[in-house]
Image (spheres, grey):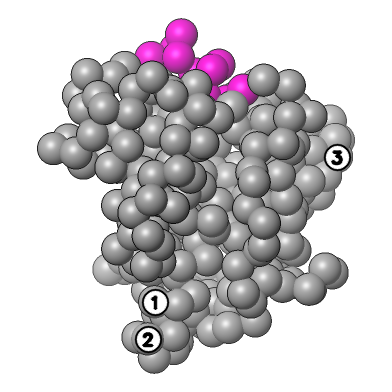
Amino acid sequence: MSADTPLMKDPEPRAGTTAPGGELIRLEGVTKRFGTNTVLDDLDFTIDPGKHVTLIGPSGSGKTTILRLLMTLTQPDEGTITVDGQRLFPAPEKQVREVRKKIGMVFQQFNLFPNMSVLRNVTEAPVQVLGMSKDEAEARARELLELVGLADKCDARPTRLSGGQQQRVAIARALAMRPQVLLLDEVTSALDPELVAGVLDLLRDIARSTDITMLCVTHEMGFARDISDKVLMFDGGRVIESGSPEQIFSEPEQDRTREFLGAVL
């Protein structure tokens, strides 16, 4: 599949889409503690719609916690989170559910339902959460499974697939919700090395061929350089440096960034 191949056939964006030039995600003063450990420390940053932002930094620096906050899998102790002009935290539960529909996530572990077929894994949330008809959900799921190279696996159970194939199903499942934001959390870390390139190539095509906003946590620095509009270097729960991939990877300003990149490149 070439990078110029259109990946989506959605005729209309979901209602509430941010106007061009507006912020899509804003974190202000976000602090998260686990016991005495401050994982995020008075964090502020924004992401514009359609941009691809990659978070890099050592393990334990707070990167995945940001994704978990946006997925409402955990809550900040302080601060506010806004998505598409609507408050995600703090906010009433009904509003949280509505805002949460704008966000999809692909996890390190595939988290597929083993008792469901591949097709149903992709259709279940659009039917149950978005209220999409079964026929519409299945049509979209088949289109997305073709996109990820698994059109012939609709009736298979996830346990019959390789790790790379399961992660491709997980990507299709996330896209089936028509999210405005796609969160990627170390999506190749659970894969055998020979399967990594195929999944990263698929994500590169999605990044280049759609206007979906991406927030990515990865240790794959080549991938981060390829897809990112902006890279944020984290350390100790704070952004210590941000810039274009060229600036961060070629001419980092901070000693800590140079030290980290020297260890992983």
- Mark 2 vs 1: CB contact within 8 A: yes
Residue holding disc 2: 94
x 67%, y 56%: residue: 11
Q: Is residue 200 magenta?
A: yes
Which label number is shown at residue 97? Answer: 1
| On screen, residue 90 above or below 71 | below
**On the image, which quarter does residue 56 sit in?**
top right
The residues colored magenta run 190-201
Q: Is residue 214 magenta?
A: no
**On the image, which quarter does residue 83 sit in?**
bottom right
Image coordinates for residue 24, horizontal then vertical, percent:
68, 69
Q: CA distance from mark 3 to mark 1?
A: 38 Å
Q: Which residue type carries mark 2? A: Lys
Which image quarter is the N terminus in? top right
Q: CA distance from mark 2 to mark 3?
A: 41 Å
Residue holding disc 3: 247
First in sequence: mark 2 vs mark 3: 2
Q: CA distance from mark 2 to mark 1?
A: 5 Å
Depth check: give the residue in front, 144 or 105. 144
Depth check: give the residue in front, 79 or 198. 198
x 39%, y 44%: residue: 138
